[in-house]
Image: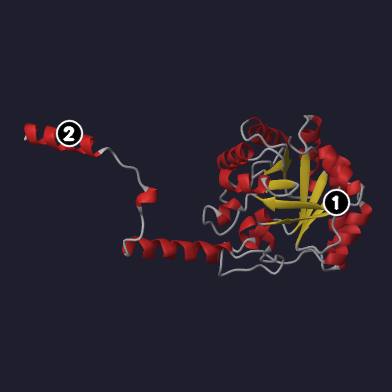
Amino acid sequence: MRTTLQQLTQRVAAGERLVMVTCYDYTSARLVDRSQIDLVLVGDSLGMVMLGHESTVPVTLDDMVRAAASVVRGSRRPLVVGDLPFLSYTTPAAALAAAHRLLAEGGVQSVKLEGGAQMVPQVESLVRAGVPVMGHLGFTPQSVNQIGMRVQGREAGAAVSVIQDALALEAAGAWAIVLELVPEQLAAEVTARVSVPTIGIGAGAGCDGQVQVWHDMLGLFEDFVPRHTRRFRSLGAEAVAGLDEYVAAVRAGQFPTRENTSRMDDDVLAQVRSDLAERA
């Protein structure tokens, strides 16, 4: 049975930390389902790790809906959150239309959007319509062309803005807030001031939970390890080693073997050859 928002907020109230990971496809979702992960994010980061773009900006709503649907089909237990992609929620009406597709076609249980006080009308509209909303503050990837990829909220004024944005999102009805690339002291301050769960990525251990990108934490990209992650496994190296073993076995005539193939009866093969000879 799929985890609910109420169960997640109850766990936080009981002092339990939430654990979230990104997920973009059916196979990964099946693996997540076998773990103890609480919730998954079908993130627009799929633009970089799945589609090869340089940022999340090119990701479309169609991309998100398709990925979300595959994740939902592959999982039964974790709550699934889907990102609203770039420029799909510029107005409350647009946000409602995009969220409708993610819930109705993608099957997610919540949407996530980036931005603070300026997003209050969208959040309020979504919540009134029955759509659970997760906020996202600090470094907001969809604004990378405007703010650059760097830690946010180091200066006093910027830090105050992050706190005020968090309080505005909470008041508007957001049920949780992601804090990305902000100083750990600021993340802890936000967490202390809001009553909804905070989920950090590059924001220290003071949040109510953590989220990491699947490919980063499992080492699928050997040439890049973000500072805010830890490589819990090196699956990329394991995959390459497995592929090289496959190449060697095929070239050496060691694969496939009888155990990997099927056979027909010898009399059937004889009949085939006889039939072909007659037709010739």
Residue at the image point whose x is 88% and y is 61% from the top: 188
Residue nearest the observer in this picture, 220 or 164: 220
Horizontal and vertical percent for residue 178? 78, 52
The label on residue 191 is none
**Is the residue under label 2 in contact with that under label 1 (CB below 8 Å)?**
no
Element carrying mark 1: helix
Mark sitting earlier along the chain (1/2): 1
Residue at horizontal 85%, vertical 38%?
6
Quadrant in which the N terminus is drawn: top right
- Image position of 130 (left or right of 277): right
Image position, residue 59 (x, y; %): 57, 48
Q: Which mark is residue 271?
A: 2
Quadrant of the rendered structure where residue 215 is?
bottom right
Mark count: 2
When the figure is inspected, residue 252 is found, relative to residue 113, above or below; the finding is below
- Compared across the picture, whether 46 is left or right of 128 comes to left
Amino acid type, mark 2: Gln
Graded by Cα atoms within 10 Å as few (under 14), some (14 to 19) or many (20 or more), the crowding at tag 2 reads few
Q: CA distance from mark 1 to mark 2?
A: 77 Å
Q: Nearer the viewer, residue 225 or 147?
A: 225
How far across and down, in percent of the image, does residue 91 sit?
A: 71, 38
Q: How does the figure colour the protein chain or chains?
A: secondary structure
Q: Residue at x 37, y 65 (%)?
A: 248
Q: Report whether residue 42 is seen.
A: no
- Give the quarter of the figure containing the C terminus: top left
Q: Residue at x 88, y 56 (%)?
A: 163
- Rendered view: 54 above or below 112: below
Q: Amino acid at mark 1?
A: Ala
> Which residue is label 1 attached to?
166
